[in-house]
Image (cartoon, rainbow, N blue to C red):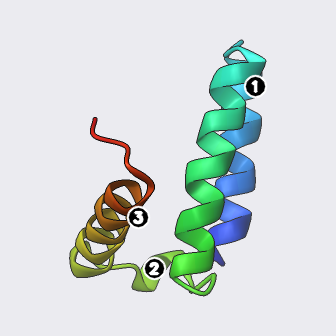
Amino acid sequence: MQLSKAISGFILAKQADGLSANTLDIYRWALDKLTAFLNDKPIESVTVEDLRRFFAYLKDDYRKAGITH
């Protein structure tokens, strides 16, 4: 299953759970960045190393934007 399809299911489940629109928007934003970073690879092939590289990328991206927390 492609990462984007799994994320769509996750978002749908969170909507059903009653999460706020703002929370869902934040989830979508972050998960869209993850999907783009990993080129929408199959979820079964996402590794811990992939996620570590993604979080390092986000940290660097935030640092460049002047966001400190």
Labels 3 and 1 touching (C-beta < 8 A): no
Q: Residue at x 67, y 17 (%)?
A: 17
Label 2 or label 3, whichever lies nearer to me, is 3
Q: CA distance from mark 3 to mark 1?
A: 28 Å
Q: Amino acid at mark 1?
A: Gln
Q: CA distance from mark 2 to mark 3?
A: 26 Å
Q: Residue at x 72, y 49 (%)?
A: 9
Q: CA distance from mark 1 to mark 2?
A: 24 Å
The residue where tag 1 is placed is: 15
Q: Is residue 39 left or right of residue 12?
A: left
Above or below, 10 against 42 in this view is: above
Location of residue 28 in the rendering, given as x and y in whole percent from the top left corner? 68, 46
Location of residue 32 in the rendering, given as x and y in whole percent from the top left corner? 65, 61
Q: Amino acid at mark 3?
A: Asp
Q: Secondary structure at mark 2?
A: helix
2 or 3: tag closer to the N-terminus: 2
Q: Is residue 69 left or right of residue 6?
A: left
The residue where tag 3 is placed is: 61
Q: Is residue 62 left or right of residue 40?
A: left
Above or below, 7 against 60 in this view is: above
The residue where tag 2 is placed is: 44
